[in-house]
Image: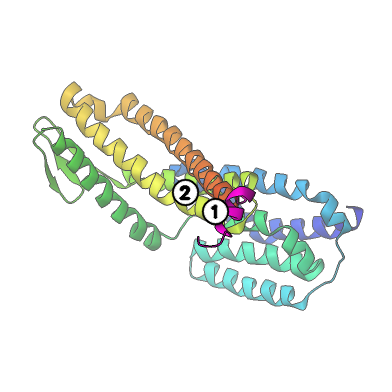
Amino acid sequence: MNRHAAPAVVICAGVVWVYGGVLSSLVQQWASDDNYSHGFLILPLVAYFVWERRAQLARAEIHPHLGGLALVLFSFVLFAAGVLGADLFLARISLLGVVVGSLLFVWGTEHVRLLRFPLLLLPLMVPLPAVLFNQVAFPLQLIASQAGEAVVAAAGIPIVREGNVLELPNTTLAVVEACSGIRSLMSLITLASVLAYFTERTLVARVLIVLSAVPVAILANAARVAGTGLMSYWLGPRAAEGFFHTFSGWVLFVVACAGLVAVQRILRSASTWIRKPVSPVIAEEQCLPGR
């Protein structure tokens, strides 16, 4: 790894010098916005996966690619546009382009191929722009409120829904942005990516596990809203706030994680069954005349 050390240090120093303000704002948002607190997990995970590949990287041939330089230059254009236009998302995304482009320009395509998984994790640490975030969060709010209404009504409790507001006889519940489930969705996608990497070897299985994070997160959040409605009616409005509300969120997040593991086990069982060899006796019977 000695041949990689010097250029890596130079690149890291350059990135910190140019993107110091962007990195600082990114960390501040992770610390202040619960929707993206999982960002603190991404860099340690990326560092681990890079370290895990150190022997392969040491053996890989170095073939600098000019396409990497083009990507770096394009990323700097995005960075300038983000800074001048006060668009943090563009500035942050340009950082990822600089990282990938530098890797490609200095070391080549083989190194990019070896590091493709940790590189694919990096976009998960970048918060979505507000416009896109709201486009995702609002439908999730409606789905959660509709599910909550259906479950509470099925329990025989009078309930009226107006948009994302649930009216019960003794309280009013608003499924606000924080209860949309996008927070658990982002965290579950990150966990699903890591789970898929460690447990599966085929691309199809890995993609299915990551995609399953979406319905799992939606179901878990819908269950939380429905449970909050039921508890608010049976135990009083205080069940929808404070410790009870926070605790229910943690419990259902753990349940959602268990759901991801269950999806992985189901996929593993299905793939094992599909690849199961045909019994010689059965194969012989199928070849008998008249069958």
Q: Which residues are magenta?
A: 277-291
At mark 2, the secondary structure is helix
Q: Name the residue tied to disc 1.
A: 124
Which sits earlier in the primary sequence, circle 1 or circle 2? 1
- Identify which amino acid the numbered label 1 is placed on: Leu
Query: Residue 108, image x and y in percent?
Result: 79, 69
Q: Residue at x 20, y 38 (%)?
A: 151
Residue 2: say if magenta. Answer: no
Q: Position of residue 252 (x, y in %)?
A: 39, 34
Residue 76 higher or lower than 38, as above or below: below
User: Toward the viewer: 276 or 190?
Assistant: 276
Question: Disc 1 to disc 2, how far (Cα)?
Answer: 8 Å
* Horizontal side, residue 176 vs residue 12: left or right: left
Query: Which of the two residues, 72 or 116, is positioned nearer the viewer here?
Result: 116
Q: Is residue 281 magenta?
A: yes
10 Å crowding of disc 1: few (<14), some (14-19), many (20+):
some
The residue pinned by badge 2 equals 186
Secondary structure, mark 1, is helix
Task: Give the image location of residue 217, x and y in percent.
Answer: 40, 45
Dot 2 crowding, Cα within 10 Å, few <14, some 14–19, many 20+: many
Please tell me which residue is depicted at 67% across the width and 74% down the height of the picture.
71
**Amino acid at circle 2:** Met
Is residue 77 or residue 55 the one in the foreground?
A: 55
Question: Residue at coordinates 70% horizontally, 68% vertically from top-left?
Answer: 101
